[in-house]
Amino acid sequence: MTPVLPRGDDPPIPPAPPAGGNTGRLISANMLATVEQASTGSDPYRVDADGVPYVPVGDGGIVLGVRLGDGAWDHAGDHAAPGACLVHADPAAGYALAAQACAGNLAEVRTGAAAGETGAVIGKRGEGGRVIVVFDQSVLRRLRPGDQVAVRGRGQGATGPVPGVTLCNIDPALLDRLPVEISGDTLTAGVRAVLPSRLAGNGIGRPTPMWDLDLQLTPASADRHGAAGLRLGDLVAITDLDARFNAGYRRGWLSVGLVVHGGSPQPGHGPGVTVIATGPAGPLAAVADPAGHRGLTEEAALEVARAPR
């Protein structure tokens, strides 16, 4: 991949973070969360891109039957994520939960009928400081809103394995289970699609450690961007996007993320991506495989989360 260099009037690119990784020095933090109850206002409707009201289903709470590997538009839902969303009633604690929980982290149910069962964090869900956790379907059926869950946050602060690439929102242990290769000074991610930053909708300008980015894609528009086969758990790359802090346009940069929730009829919304790596194009590269890409599986996420470390 040939990197796109910044123009002379672009802000200078900051010095690259050191490479080599600091996995052995990462801190783990036990945090309390509760299983979210899906909620709505006194008016239950949202309005789709054609101006038609609809009742959103699957946006938060406990969602049964939606799995990693399902198509982003397979289900008649709105922002439907696989598993359960976790929150905290205290806003400050909720922000900390969202910021420090990372894909691949362990989540253990502490109260209720599913007490003792474990799941894996796979990403974030913007509004409300939500953390998305996959559980076995048998566990989801026993979960109830308000059940307490302990999340072992680990991953923020990890240094990239090559100079210039910043990791975020991921326990480095999960990288080994994703189609990511390191060769010399380049990290290359196998992705379902490489998409332009103009498709980034809800979440743009927001802090990356706490928000996902919605892709403004529909089943009708996805094909022309090579994303017709987009699935939950896929990796995608977004060009000209710097997501180290608050996600925003930066020519010549690349961001790679996990698809963590499905599509939405709302304008400006769509399948959600939790960014896991960002950096200048060159040190960070992406190779698209629209037909054969295999992203994160439920089995891999649970195995990594449950492994001792």
Image (spheres, grey):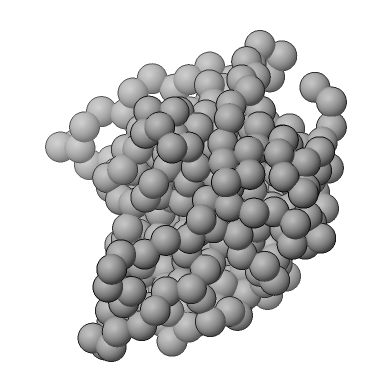
Residue that protrudes farthest toward the top in the picture: 25
- Image quarter (top left, top right, bottom left or bottom right) of the C terminus: top right
Q: From the viewer's perspective, is residue 216 above or below residue 95? A: below
Closer to us: 131 or 221 = 131
Q: From the viewer's perspective, is residue 49 above or below residue 235? A: below
Q: Which residue is drawn at 72% across and 35% down?
A: 110
Going by the image, does 148 lie left or right of 40?
right
Closer to us: 270 or 225 = 270
Residue that protrudes farthest toward the left in the picture: 9
Q: Residue at x 64, y 48 (%)?
A: 133
Q: Residue at x 31, y 43 (%)?
A: 206
Residue that protrudes farthest toward the front in the picture: 112
Q: From the viewer's perspective, is residue 66 above or below residue 255? A: below
Number of marks: 0
Where residue 209 sits: x, y (%)?
44, 36
**Can the viewer see residue 199?**
no
Where residue 242 sits: x, y (%)?
36, 41
Going by the image, does 222 lie left or right of 174?
left
Q: Residue at x 71, y 14 (%)?
A: 24
Image quarter of residue 137: bottom right
Where residue 273 sits: x, y (%)?
49, 55
Going by the image, does 122 lie left or right of 307?
left
Where residue 141 sits: x, y (%)?
74, 62
**Can the viewer see residue 34?**
yes
